[in-house]
Amino acid sequence: MNIGIFDSGIGGLTLLHQAMVLMPREKFLFYADTDHVPYGTKTRDQVISCVNEVIRFMAEHDCKAVVIACNTATAVAAEQMRSRYASFPIIGIEPAVKPAVAESGGKRVLVVATPLTVHERKLQKLVERVDDEHLVDLLELPGLVEFAERGEFVSDSVTTYLQGRLMGYELDNYRELVLGCTHFNYFKDTFRALMPPQIHMIDGSLGTVRQLMRVLDARQELLEPPAETGMEWQQIKNDICVRYFESGREITDAARLGNIAQLHERLERMRKI
């Protein structure tokens, strides 16, 4: 059986990559809903409709679990989908606000995400629940999704965009940067260059994959998990079983698959920052 992982675009590869490292014996089905990217600027009803179509596809392709590798889709649609598709677990990702606040040492926490995630009540309730000292600030970065989907990860335009969005924030007062969109992980090197050295970057991918492993283990459906730290990418990358889809169309073209392999190589470098 497969583990289904999906996002509106290539951002979900971040979570797939982490899952492949920790669970290299599993079979994965990755679905990028490129016909409807980005989710973060759509209405709630539009996102719910898109997510329903994707999970229906997963249900028809022998998935034992589905991971929503999109903070926006999780915030808007996860609960409805769990009620609608009860035969398999649906695990959602969410911004890693709780661990960031816990590790902040009383300094400020900056959460960057898409506009819909920032304004969705789910994130606001999460912040209210864990941010007793009112340390958290939320910042929308819609342009980064567009840069990522174009494959533009390191450029003067990316740097200028982030500098403009961060203008006005006294970054020396911050300790944690929460990457609240899976697309944003591709830009860790640029974030690192712009941030003071004391700022620690954190995202929800690793925690989500560990939750997936716990759920599958409880259902006795987890295949021989490796050590918690995972395995070396260069040792496993050619042996992992993954099928890639774009809005229901399987990607079989060698050039396209080669591009995906290059994205995984970048994600491996970003994973170590």
Image (cartoon, helix red, strand yellow):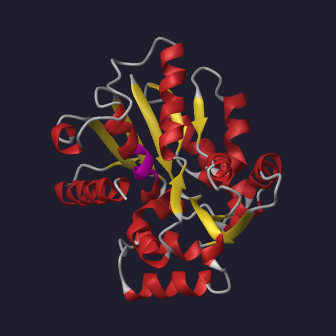
* Magenta highlight range: 12-16
Vertical arrangement, residue 153 with respect to residue 270, above or below = below
Vertical arrangement, residue 17 with respect to residue 259, above or below = above
Vertical arrangement, residue 55 with respect to residue 94, above or below = above
Quadrant in which the C terminus is drawn: bottom left
Q: Is residue 15 magenta?
A: yes
Q: Residue at x 59, y 32 (%)?
A: 90
The residue sitting at the top extreme is 220
Residue 49 location (% of width, % of height) = 66, 49
Q: Can the viewer see residue 84? A: yes
Residue 18 left/right relative to 118: left
Vertical arrangement, residue 260 with respect to residue 209, above or below = below
Q: Residue at x 23, y 40 (%)?
A: 232
Q: Residue at x 52, y 66 (%)?
A: 198
Q: Can the viewer see residue 113? A: no
Give the main secondary structure of the magenta stretch: helix
Quadrant in which the N terminus is drawn: top left
